[in-house]
Structures are given as C-alpha cells and as structure tokens.
C-alpha cells in the first residue's frame, strides 16, 4: 500500500502531558488580561473552586478594528507568573507571532494557543512552529475562523513537524454568512471529522466564543461533552460588565461554578484501545445521523409552509429553476467536502420528491403505489 502522505497525528493524550491533567480538562479565565487586580481576583476565585486546572488570559488581542483594547502585552506575563506562584494554576495565552511565543517561553507560560485568526494563515503558523521548534510545550490550535478543515489540520501538522507533540484542537465555532443563533456557528461536523481523521488528538470546546452570550454556553458545552470532547475552555471574568473584550460572553466565577454543577460529564474516561475508539466513532455516527434526521424534519416542515404559501398565491408547486439552483449549490458544496456528485444528486432528488409530496399533501401510500412520478431535475453527469 502506498504510504499516506498525511499520516494520522500521533499525539499523547492529555494525561501524558506531564502537567497532571485529567479529563475533562477545564481551562478558564478572562478573554483578556486587563490589570493585575483583575487577573488575580479571577484566578483566586477559580483556584478556590478548584476544578479548572489551566488559567487562560489573552495578552495580545486580535481585534477586528483598530483603536480597541489590544491587550496588556508583555506586562501581563508577570501577572500570569504571579497566578501560577500564588494559586498553583497552570497558565495559557494566545500567541500570534514568533515574538509572542518567545516571550511566553521566557516567562514560563505553561500552554500556548493559536487563535482562530492565526490558524488560517500558514505563514504565521509556520513562523510560530519554527520559533518553538523542539520545545516541550503544549499548544492548543483553535479552528480557523472560516469552516475549512484542511487549514485546521494543516496548522496542527506544521506544529507536529516542528516536534510539538502535546497538541490539542479547540473548537470555537465558525464565522458564517447566514444569521445563526450563535456568534460562531458550531458546525459540529467539522470537529467530528477532525476526530475521525485523528482519533488520538485531544479535542476541546470553547463554548464561550460559539455562543457569544452567557445564556447559550451551557447547552453548547453539554453538546460538546456528549460528543466526547476531552475538555472545555470557558471565558470567566470576575466582573464581566467591565470587561474590555467579549463582555457579553464572560461568566462570573460563581456562574462558572454553577455551569460545572449543571453539566453532565461522562463517567467513564475512554481508554485508548481499538475497541473504545470504534465505539467512540460509532457514537459520533449516531449523533450525526440524529442531526441529519432532525434537519430533514425541519426542512420538510418549512417545505410544507412554502406549499401553503404557494397554494394561497396560486403558484405552481414545482419550480424547476429554483430546484436547479439548489442542486448546483449542493454540487459545489459536495465538491468542496469531497462527496461524490452522484451520491449528492440521488440524495437531493429523494429530498425533493418528499418535499413535493409534503407540499402537495399527497399521502405516502399513493406515492408508493407509483400513482405519481416526479421528473429527475438537475444535470446528469
Ligand atoms: C479568545 O480566546 O479570546 C479569542 C480571541 O478566541 P478566538 O481566537 O477563538 O476568536
Ligand atoms: Mn474572547
């Protein structure tokens, strides 16, 4: 068999990172380091709760527009050092340039992460990978801001090739052009596909950046735990109302405590043997099948409403041009996702038939007897 060009990443599980970490790994702390007081107050509260093992705080903040708070920078390194000395929490921060990475190594930061705006840039990721080549430091890689699995994997591979073995991926949702109930759409299929391609890679979820508001954090976090994620990174600020970045999505230490009380953590930690991996992958398939069924259900409900609307306005149920556009869009998407066009055509045709049946209100058994047939629409290739 030909050698795989992109081998499965062999990364040690969290428990073997030599940091005393266990699953689920809980990382918590403010979006940005703002002042020594803010950092110490938040860290002390988290240490008192005792469940988060790693304290996160952004020192260099990538802001969409200039003129906003861009982080405390190097000054914050000393605050994080103090957190570690006084509370025993491990520390983590975002690095976007080789200079950031070097400053963190010199300051004894325990864990680095690459942010969603840096992961998509292979030059930046490579420059960071070169700066920390061969250093025994864990790096967390957030998904790229755009839904592109290959960029996410590519960033992990660049670090791995630099000898960084202690790697984890962080799912923080994707920017999407349509309105969704999230700040960043979770598109769970991406982390699931990442896990399927690299089963040993630790996978964490950042429900704060997915949700964008404190209310949604619990359900996103629970979903991640149900999908077998290995831990959570949550934004916690001692006084979110005055936070200088991401104020809407930061929990107080008390609310974080309540969140952890309410979440249902899986009791048995999966071991690394083949059988468990197979079970884990089957669980993921079951979850995805459920999601597909739910989405199909919603799609048919909406189709029925469109049917009512068309009837009320005397419009034909069949709209071949509209269907042609839908099919073309799906075929483009399919190509991007590596799905075969024949499969997508057949699948979409079946959806279309059911959708028209629901719009016309024809009972299922009539269709089964072959009393109706629908033309196959869309290009055949
Ligand atoms: C952050 O963690 O505060 C952050 C900037 O996240 P992301 O890179 O996921 O947007
Ligand atoms: Mn943030």
Image: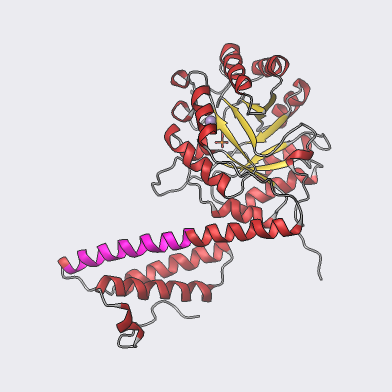
- Residue 126, quarter of the rendered image: top right
Question: Nearest the camera: 1 or 146?
Answer: 1
Examine the structure image and report whether residue 102 is included in the region drawn in magenta. no
Examine the structure image and report whether residue 307 is included in the region drawn in magenta. yes
Q: Is residue 87 left or right of residue 283?
A: right
Q: Is residue 190 left or right of residue 166?
A: left
Q: Main secondary structure of the magenta part?
A: helix
Q: Is residue 310 above or below residue 171?
A: below
Q: Is residue 25 above or below residue 105?
A: below
- Residue 349, quarter of the rendered image: bottom left
Which segment did they paint magenta?
Answer: 291-311
Question: Nearest the camera: 167 or 221?
Answer: 221
Q: Residue furthest top?
A: 37
- Asked whether residue 6 is in view, the answer is no
Q: Is residue 332 above or below residue 115?
A: below
Q: Residue furthest right?
A: 134
Q: Quadrant of the N terminus?
A: bottom right
């Amino acid at each position: 068999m030909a050698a795989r060009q992109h081998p499965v990443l062999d990364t040690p599980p969290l428990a073997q990172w030599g940091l005393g970490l266990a699953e689920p790994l809980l990382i918590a702390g403010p979006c940005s380091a703002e002042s020594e007081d803010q950092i110490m107050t938040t860290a002390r509260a988290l240490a008192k709760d005792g469940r988060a093992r790693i304290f996160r705080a952004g020192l260099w903040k990538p802001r969409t527009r200039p003129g906003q708070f861009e982080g405390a920078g190097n000054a914050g390194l000393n605050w994080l050092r103090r957190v570690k000395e006084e509370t025993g929490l491990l520390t983590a921060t975002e690095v976007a340039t080789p200079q950031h990475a070097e400053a963190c190594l010199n300051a004894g930061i325990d864990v680095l992460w690459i942010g969603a705006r840096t992961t998509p840039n292979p030059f930046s990721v490579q420059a960071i990978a070169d700066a920390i080549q061969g250093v025994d430091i864990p790096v967390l890689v957030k998904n790229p801001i755009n839904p592109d699995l290959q960029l996410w994997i590519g960033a992990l591979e660049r670090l791995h090739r630099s000898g960084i073995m202690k790697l984890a991926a962080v799912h923080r949702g994707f920017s999407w052009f349509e309105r969704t109930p999230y700040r960043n759409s979770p598109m769970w299929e991406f982390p699931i596909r990442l896990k399927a391609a690299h089963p040993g890679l630790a996978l964490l979820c950042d429900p704060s950046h997915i949700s964008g508001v404190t209310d949604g954090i619990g359900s996103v976090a629970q979903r991640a735990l149900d999908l077998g994620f290995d831990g959570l990174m949550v934004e916690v600020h001692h006084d979110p109302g005055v936070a200088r970045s991401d104020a809407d999505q930061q929990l107080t230490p008390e609310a974080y405590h309540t969140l952890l009380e309410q979440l249902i953590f899986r009791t048995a930690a999966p071991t690394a043997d083949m059988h468990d991996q197979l079970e884990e992958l089957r669980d993921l398939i079951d979850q995805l099948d459920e999601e597909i069924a739910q989405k199909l259900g919603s799609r048919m409900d909406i189709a029925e409403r469109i049917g009512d609307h068309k009837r009320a306005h005397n419009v034909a149920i069949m709209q071949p041009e509209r269907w042609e556009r839908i099919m073309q869009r799906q075929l483009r998407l399919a190509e991007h996702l590596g799905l075969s066009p024949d499969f997508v055509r057949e699948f979409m045709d079946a959806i279309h038939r059911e959708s028209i049946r629901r719009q016309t209100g024809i009972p299922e058994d009539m269709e089964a007897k072959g009393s109706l047939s629908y033309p196959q629409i869309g290009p055949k290739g």
